[in-house]
């Protein structure tokens, strides 16, 4: 346990229980705790504490004042399987309401422990989806800061879309220009996040409940947001300067870009310990990559939550094979994994590609892989954490968004930064309903995008040059004197000024 000096500024971090939300908040906790007289407590549950302990342990051992506060999770009481304490562990979308109820019950558990936290927390940094933290912060009269984990591009787009009256009259295939942005960005209604694009979702009692929870969540987030002290953004100012400037105008200035948060892991051990570290063999990947030529490998991973249906996975596999480039393919087939494995065995896919392809069915050390000199392209689902990791490594991207805000993220990579090429995914595939949508992208589309990004001609070289330059800017931003480093200093000073 860290020192209990009352002079310490104590931040209470409350992430959503999902890897894409917990991991960057742990990274943020490390950055905060490295500053003088700052103590950080991360609220989590027993299973998640075990899962993510390795990424914190070396810092705790070195005396860094950061630790977990473990709260009992009422999963089994709410109909969840034993040990299901994270969104990526849900057996199906039908249990999402049960999971949400269990998360809401953490409020009472935290408030029962709040007064025992020493020194008393002076600020809550909460994932935007944990709505009850607004009431908890008000109860204890401390500022609440939202952590969305997304870009200012996404924040600005969402803000103006809520004001865009003509949206309701559009069909899914209709193209629109995103309103209020510094650049002209075109997108179809069917590619927008679910709060603007609910069509295409399956019906049923359980799914209606999911929609109801989502709708209520979005409404409460918008209602609470003006009453929060500010927002932390996992981005850096040089990446999207005009969008940062415009969003700060809207928010009245209390917006701090602290990213890329993944760069808090500035050594190889830190990079490899993000996520399910115990389940992977990092040396296997590094040795395999060492055997490949510089910038020759395509790395594919669709994150921790995407579960692509087997027919669509097969199209992806065929594209990787036909491209003739070495590849690492991280597969998550979800409930239909047996169907995919049957195809692998019956067709002899792994045998055919064994000399140049690595098919992985487990968690991988993504930051380590992307940082390797043999990786030439990142085929990504456009989750914002993954995009930032690709940017930080200076790797061009092949973009294949799946759900949520990922099509907006694709626009950043392809249209704003110009460091990626789209496979041409036509619309959002709603999370948990992948089977319903079938095959939306064919193998030849994926193959063409891979070839464009890996091309050694002028276009490919220019894309690589831009990606490398952004990678250097990302590292500068997080180093002493950089924009994100300075923003963290300003954030800490602001909270200290509120608590003299």
Image (cartoon, rainbow, N blue to C red):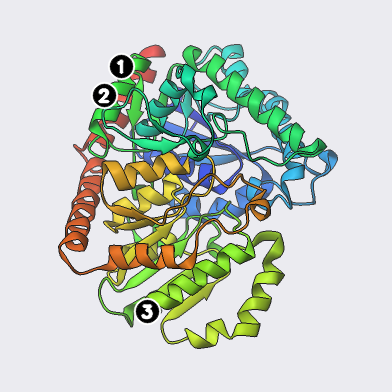
In which quadrant of the rendered image does the C terminus lie? top left
Height in image: 92 above or below 118?
below
Tell me, for residue 249, which label it has, or none.
1
Disc number lying in front (2 or 3): 3
Image spot of residue 457 (x, y percent): 17, 67
The reply to whether residue 144 is visible in this rendering is: no
Nearer-the-camera pick, 157 or 1: 157
Tell me, for residue 245, which label it has, or none.
2
Tell me, for residue 324, which label it has, or none.
3
Tell me, for residue 222, which label it has, or none.
none
Q: Distance between the residues labelled 2 and 3?
A: 43 Å
**In the structure shown, which secondary structural element does the residue marked by tag 3 occupy?**
loop
Image spot of residue 432 (x, y percent): 67, 48
Disc number lying in front (3 or 1): 3
- Label 1 Cα neighbours within 10 Å, binned few <14 / some 14-19 / many ≥20: few
Height in image: 413 above or below 193?
below
Nearer-the-camera pick, 395 or 279: 395
**In the structure shown, which secondary structural element does the residue marked by tag 2 occupy?**
helix
């Amino acid at each position: 346990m860290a020192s209990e000096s009352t002079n310490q500024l104590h931040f209470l971090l409350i992430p959503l229980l999902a890897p894409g939300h917990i991991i960057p908040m742990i990274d943020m906790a490390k950055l905060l705790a490295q500053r003088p007289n700052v103590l950080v407590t991360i609220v989590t549950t027993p299973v998640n504490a075990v899962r993510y302990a390795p990424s914190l342990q070396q810092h705790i051992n070195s005396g860094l004042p950061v630790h977990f506060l473990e709260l009992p999770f009422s999963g089994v009481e709410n109909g969840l399987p034993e040990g299901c304490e994270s969104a990526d562990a849900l057996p199906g979308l039908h249990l999402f309401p049960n999971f949400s109820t269990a998360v809401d019950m953490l409020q009472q558990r935290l408030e029962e422990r709040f007064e025992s936290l020493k020194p008393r927390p002076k600020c809550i940094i909460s994932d935007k989806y944990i709505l009850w933290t607004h009431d908890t912060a008000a109860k204890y009269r401390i500022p609440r800061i939202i952590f969305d984990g997304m870009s200012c591009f996404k924040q600005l787009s969402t803000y103006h879309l809520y004001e865009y009256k003509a949206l309701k009259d559009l069909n899914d295939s209709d193209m629109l220009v995103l309103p209020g942005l510094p650049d002209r960005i075109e997108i179809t209604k069917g590619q927008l996040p679910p709060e603007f694009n609910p069509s295409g979702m399956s019906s049923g009692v359980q799914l209606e409940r999911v929609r109801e929870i989502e709708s209520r969540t979005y409404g409460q987030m918008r209602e609470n947001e003006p009453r929060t002290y500010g927002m932390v953004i996992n981005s850096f100012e040089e990446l999207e300067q005009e969008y940062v400037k415009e969003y700060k105008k809207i928010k009245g200035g209390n917006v701090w870009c602290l990213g890329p948060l993944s760069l808090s892991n500035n050594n190889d051990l830190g990079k490899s310990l993000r996520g399910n570290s115990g389940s992977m063999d990092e040396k296997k990947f590094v040795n395999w990559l060492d055997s490949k030529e510089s910038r020759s490998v395509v790395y594919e991973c669709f994150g921790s939550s995407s579960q692509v249906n087997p027919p669509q996975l097969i199209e992806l596999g065929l594209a990787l094979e036909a491209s003739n480039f070495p590849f690492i393919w991280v597969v998550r087939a979800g409930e239909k994994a047996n169907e995919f494995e049957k195809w692998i065995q019956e067709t002899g896919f792994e045998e055919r590609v064994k000399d140049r392809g690595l098919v992985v069915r487990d968690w991988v050390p993504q930051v380590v892989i992307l940082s390797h000199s043999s990786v030439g392209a990142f085929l990504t689902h456009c989750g914002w954490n993954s995009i930032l990791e690709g940017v930080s490594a200076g790797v061009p991207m092949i973009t294949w968004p799946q759900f949520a805000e990922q099509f907006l993220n694709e626009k950043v990579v392809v249209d704003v930064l110009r460091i990626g090429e789209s496979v041409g995914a036509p619309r959002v595939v709603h999370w948990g309903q992948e089977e319903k949508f079938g095959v939306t992208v064919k193998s030849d589309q994926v193959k063409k995008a891979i070839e464009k990004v890996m091309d050694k001609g002028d276009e490919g070289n220019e894309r690589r040059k831009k990606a490398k330059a952004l990678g250097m800017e990302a590292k500068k931003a997080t180093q002493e004197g950089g924009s994100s480093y300075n923003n963290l200093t300003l954030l800490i000073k602001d909270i200290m000024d509120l608590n003299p």
